[in-house]
Amino acid sequence: MDFRVRWAERLEQFPDDAPAIMFDDITIRWAEIRAFAKQFEAALDQIGIDPWQTLGVLARNRPGQAAAIMSAIASGRSISIIYTMQSPEGIARDIEKLKHTLLIGSEEDWSPEAIGAARRTGSAGLQFVSRKGLEFEVVPGLGAANPALLRTSPQPLSLELLSSGTTGQPKRIEFPGTVLDRMLQTMSIGVEPIPEPEITFFPLSGFGGMTPFLASIFRCGSVCLLERFSLDTWLKAIETLRPTRIVMLPAIMREVLDKQITKDCFRSVQIVWGGSAPLAPETQDSFEDLYGIPVIWAYGATEFAGTAASWTPALREEFGKTKRGSVGRPYLGVTVRIVDPETGAEKPRGEEGLLEAKVPAFGEKWIRTTDIAVMDEDDFIFLKGRADQAINRGGFKVLPETITDALLAYPAVKDAMAGGIDDRRLGQVPVAAVELATGNEHVTEEELLAFLRTKLVSYAIPTAIYIVPSLPRTGNMKAHLAALADLTSG
């Protein structure tokens, strides 16, 4: 049975009065989702969009877009995401480049630039009437698609998602239906599934948001969808739903610790899991010691369609104190190796190189990452940084993570990021930005630089450290290194 059939059959199992999407102060039930699906398919038929044509979704974490994605997959339609966290001109460029037969999104995404681009390509357009509801209408002037855009041959179900955009513009990666199964399978991270809704704040435009969204729907038929992350909104969702498992990222964990959130807020939580970025052992220890909740970490990538390595409760029990800082062992069925970046030859255990993985869903090919890693004799993987983010300072290579980790070791620093900027003489020089912990507003750049001189070699010392109220982040809550240049020129 293929993924589309399993997905459609699963969606039919949920009672009409059961909650499907929780958003802000509303709950949308399955009867409303099914009514939307019928209206949506009828609108596509009226416009002339057949079941084999790819739909463009102007993605936001809202009920309308979520319902459209669920319904489209159930009917076997391919979906292509258009990133909305960009300028109107950027959205318009994507519309012209992709030439989808139909686009659906929120009213505010249909700027004059976007409408003009759709008219030039001949794309039809639909828009949701409100932020919270499922009602939609035709965008004025975009009620029919150009016949030249219509496909004449059936295409298999696929889902085109975006990478996280940590280092720049998100990249498009297309996943066939055969790979979507893996997206759901790897969500358990070695623990038994529990039928409770996922609180998801990752953008639906990317793999990191789409995976937990689809998995939560498939597993228990409901999801608590946050439009974006804010600590107060997230804590309110935890208070309301009382989940036994939650997702956290390093930045969230540091904010929880900095704000001294009470243990009572997490009284229902039995386990925290996460990935997205390496977790400093000191941060994990502080969180676990204070809240008494075990943390299960993992490593994955959009290119793997899921998890490549992870901890499990059993591994944590056996190795938790001796493998601190690891992202765990290779996930079941996944083969990992560390290779020389120049020759591609496999490196011995304990030596740094680029991480490659072989994932059954993608066949026998090795998928190379830009992640620098070490694998020890017990198959535990330790991430060291990203090769494509290395700063070349006059021939000396510096990993931004080296600077970030040193800054995070300073008690007054809540969070930090580092990267390279262009320099006429040296090619690149490192700079950093920090967010100070509450009560440490008196800390200066000179004090931080003096501390780094005790931790780093001279060529790794940033030429400047910018103290900011909050670090620029992507929708996935990762430090937005591409925005660091904006801080330096501000």
Image: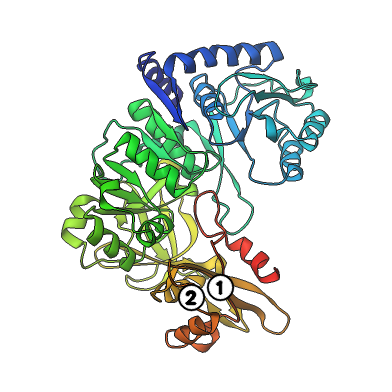
Above or below, 4 against 161 in this view is above
* Figure quadrant of the N terminus: top left
Q: Amino acid at mark 1?
A: Ala
The x, y position of residue 83, in whole percent, is 63, 42
Q: Which residue is mark 1?
A: 432
**Left or right, residue 82 beside residue 323:** right
The x, y position of residue 469, in whole percent, is 55, 64
Q: Amino acid at mark 2?
A: Ile
Callout 2: 10 Å neighbours few (<14), some, many (20+)? many
Element at label 2? helix
Picture quadrant where residue 407 is located: bottom left
Q: Nearer the viewer, residue 396 or 292?
A: 292
Give me the residue at 43% from left, 76% from top: 406
Picture quadrant where residue 260 is located: bottom left
Residue 1 makes an appearance in the image: no
* Figure quadrant of the C terminus: bottom right
Q: Which residue is mark 2?
A: 403
Give me the residue at 26% from left, 48% from top: 264
Earlier sequence position, callout 1 versus callout 2: 2
**Left or right, residue 476 beside residue 268:** right
Q: Are marks 1 and 2 in contact (CB under 8 Å)?
A: yes
The x, y position of residue 488, in whole percent, is 66, 71
Q: CA distance from mark 1 to mark 2?
A: 8 Å
Callout 1: 10 Å neighbours few (<14), some, many (20+)? many
